[in-house]
Image (cartoon, coloured by chain):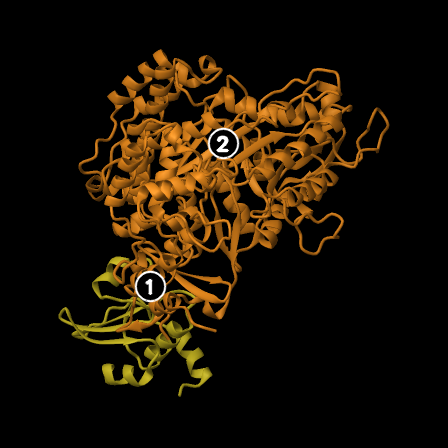
Amino acid sequence: MLSLSSLKFANSQKKKYQTSLAMKKIIKFEKNDCAPCNMVSAYLDLKGVQYETVNPFEHPELAMKYKVRSVPTVIVEQQDEILHRIIGFKPEELQRALAV
Amino acid sequence: MIAKKWILLNNEIMRKQDDEYSLHKDKEAVRSYFLDYVNKNTVFFYTLKEKVDYLIENDYYIDFYQWYTFEEMQQVYDMVYARKFRFPSFMSAFKFFQSYALRDDSGEKFLERYEDRVVAVALFLSRGNLEEAMSQALILINQEYQPATPTFLNAGKKRSGELVSCFLDEVGDNLNGIGYAIDSAMKLSSIGGGVSFNMSKVRGRGESIKGVENRSSGVLPVMKIMEDTFSYANQLGQRAGAGAVYLNIFHTDIEEFLDCKKINVDEKVRIKSLSIGVIVPDKFMELAEKDEACYLFYPHTVKLEYGQYLDEMDMDQMYEALITNPNVRKKKINARHLLVKIAQTQKESGYPYIFYKGNANRGHALNGLGNVKFSNLCTEIMQVSEVSDIESYGKEDTIRYGISCNLGSLNIVTVMDNRRVKEAVKTAMTSLTVVSDITNIEMVPSIRKANEELHSVGLGAMNLHAFLARNFIMYESDDALDFCNVFFMMVNFYSIERSMEIAKERKKTFKGFESSDYASGVYFDSYIRDDIKPKSEKVAKLFEGIEVPSREDWERLKAQVAEHGIYHAYRMAIAPNQSTSYIMNSTASVMPVVDVIEVREYGDSTTYYPMPYLTNDNYFFYKSAYDMDQKKVLRLISVIQRHVDQGISTILHTNTKDSTRDLAVYYIYAHKLGLKSLYYTRTRKAGIDECVSCAV
C-alpha cells in the first residue's frame, strides 16, 4: 500500500504529455476532480512509467477508438494492438500489465 | 413492499458488464411497464366507436361530432396507430402516463394511450379540417413537434384548463393599477398560466404619496401580496400557481428586491415562491465595466419631473440628465458591487433572472410600436408591453398591451432525420396559431387585447445536445455553432413564410405591421447580405437532402411579406421545456445535458434516465453542462439568438469553486455577445460522487 507522503511526492513529480519511447504505448484516460484518476497517476509516476493522458470529454474520438467507458482507464498498446486495459485504480493489475 | 418489475429492470441499466452500461435493459423496462402496469390499468373498449362515444358521452372529450364524422376520426386514428409508436425509454413512457394521459374520474384507470392523446390534440386544433388534422397528427406521432404542456394536456378535453402557457403584464403606480395586477394574477393563475409582472413603475420605498414624503412602502409589500395570491389561486389544487416579478436595476428598491431571495433574511421580507428578475439596461453594464459610481433613482420623482416612467426611458440618453437634475431623488451605489450582489444572490438561490434590455431591443422588429421592457417566468418571452391606466368606478379604463404567449417546440433530431424541417415548422406554426385564435382571456382585458391584435406565438426547439452527440459533434465545438446557425435560420425562414401565408389567407396582419421592420424590409437585410450555408463538410453532410433557403429565397420572402404582411407579431422563443422533453425523448431545450444518466427519485423508487440516443460509444459526447466552458455555451446560444425574434432560456451551470467574480464575468460576456437574458444559475455542489464516470 502506498503511503500518503509518497503519493504527494509522486504528484509533485508528475510528468505528463510525454510519449513513451519504448515500443509499448501507455495511455491513461482521466478527468479532472476524479480521485481514483489521481491515484493511478501517482502510482505510475512513482514507478517511473511514462504515459500520455487524455480527457475523454475533450477527445471523445479517442475514447471511442479505444472503447473507453469510464475513467480512469489505462490502455497498454503495442503496434495498434491493445495488450491490457486496466479500469480503475488496481495496483496489482497495473503492476502485472506494466511489469514494473 | 412489492418491488415493481419495471423499476428493477430500469435500475439494471447501471449494472456494468465489461465496463459497459446495460442500456438495453431500459427497453425491457418499458415493455414490462406496459405489460405489467399500463395495459392492466387501461379501460378496454371493443371498438374505436365505442371508445370515442364513451369519452364524449361521459364528458371526458368535447363533442368531436360537431366537426367530424366518425369515419373521418377513424381515418386519423388509423394513420396514427399504423405508425406503431413505441416509447424509447422508460422515463418517457412513465412521464406520459403519470402526467398527461387521460384517466377516469376515479383517477385509477387510463382512458388514453399516447396515440389517443395525439389524435385528440390534432382533432381539436384542426376544428373540422380533416386534412389539417392528418398533418397535425403526423408531426405529433412522429415526435417532430411538441406543444407546450397546457396545450398537449388540455386540448380536446371537456373539463380542462386553458391552452396558453404564459402571461405578462405591467403594474401601474397607483392602487388601481396594483389592484388590477393582483386581480389579474389571481385569475390567470387559476386558469393555468405562469404570470410575470413588471414592478419597475411602482414608486420606491420612502417616496411621497399625494405629496407627503416618506409614505410609500415600495415594491416589496406588493410582492408579498403577489406571492400569497399565487399560492392561493392554484389550478383546482393540481398545479401550484407560478409567478415572477421584474424590477429595473436603476429602481431604488433594487437592493431589497435582491435580498428577498436570501436564505438568512428576515421572514417579513423573504419571498420564497415568487421568481425574480432584474431588468438591466446597457448603461448599467457600461458603468459596471468602467467601475464607476452608479446612481439609483426614485421612480416617482422621475415620473413627476419628466412625465415619463424611469423604466421607459432610454438610460443611455437620460442618465446624465437624471444625475444632474436636483428634483430627481437618487441613491449612490457602486455598479460592480451591485453586480457582485446579484452573483451572490444567484449562488444562494439561483435567482435573479437577468434581462438585458438593450440587447432585447436591438433588432427588435417592432420598435415602431414600442419597446420590450421585461420578460416572463422562463425569460424567453420578449414582447412590447405598455401599462394600462385603470380608473376608479364610473370612469373608462385605458387598456394597453399585456402579453400572452403560447409555446411549442420542434424536436431537432426527428425533423432532421425525417428531412421535414420545412413541413414541421409550418405545421407547428399552424398549430400555435389555432391556440392563439381560440384563446380568449376575457377576464384580463390587457392580455386579451394583446392576443387579439398581435397573435403572438413562440416556436422553440429541443433535443439539440442529443442531436449533436448522436452525430459525434461536441456541444462546445465550432461544428455545433455551424449547425445551429443554419438550422435556426431555417426555422426563422419557414416561420415567417407560414406567418405570411396565414396573413395572405386571412387578409389580416398583426396590428401595427406597417410600422414594423418586417414591413420596411430592414429585418431581412442581414439575410440578404450574407448567404448562410453549412461551413464544414461534416455539417454540410447533416443537411444533405434538405433544401436550405438561400439569399434569393430570402429576397423573395421579403417581397412577399411586403405585399401580404405577416400574421404574428412574434413567432419564436426557446423555452426550457422540462416534462415535455421527457415524453419526446429529448434533451431539454438547446441547453447541454446535466448528467449522462439522470437519477430521479419518485416516491418510493429511484429511476435512471439515460440521455436520449446514448450508447456506450457516444458516451463522452454527452459532456455535462457543469464541466463545460460556460463561455462556449453562451457563444452557441448567441448564434441561435440571431435567428430568434424573442429570447432563449439560458441556464448558467457553475461549480462551487466558481467565485462571484467568475459569475460577473459571465454576465458581462453574455451581454457583449448580445444575449437577451439569463435564466437560472445552477451551482453543482462539490462532493465525492462528483466523479460521474468513475467505475470504481
The vertical placement of B558 against B675, above or below, is above
Q: Are marks 1 and 2 in contact (CB under 8 Å)?
A: no
In this rendering, which labeled residue sits more in front, label 1 or label 2? 1
The colour with which the image depicts chain A is: yellow
The one nearer the camera, B216 or B103, is B103
Name the foreground residue: B268 vs B631.
B268
Identify which amino acid the numbered label 2 is placed on.
Cys
- The quadrant of the rendering that contains the C terminus of chain B is bottom left
Q: Identify the residue under disc 2.
A: B405
Give coordinates of residue B229: x percent, y percent. Answer: 68, 41
**Is disc 1 surrounded by few (<14), some (14 to 19) or many (20+) residues within 10 Å?**
many
> Does residue A38 appear to the left or right of B218 in the view shown?
left
The answer to which of marks 1 and 2 sits earlier in the sequence is 1
Q: According to the image, label 1 marks what residue?
A: B32
Q: Chain of mark 2?
A: B
| Apparent side of residue A50 relative to residue A8 in the rendered image (left or right) | left
Across and down, in percent, residue A51 comes to 27, 72
* 10 Å crowding of disc 2: few (<14), some (14-19), many (20+): many
Which residue corresponds to the image point at 83% horizontal and 24% vertical from the top-left?
B210
Instruction: Give the letter of the orange chain.
Output: B
How many angstroms separate mark 1 from mark 2 (CA)? 39 Å
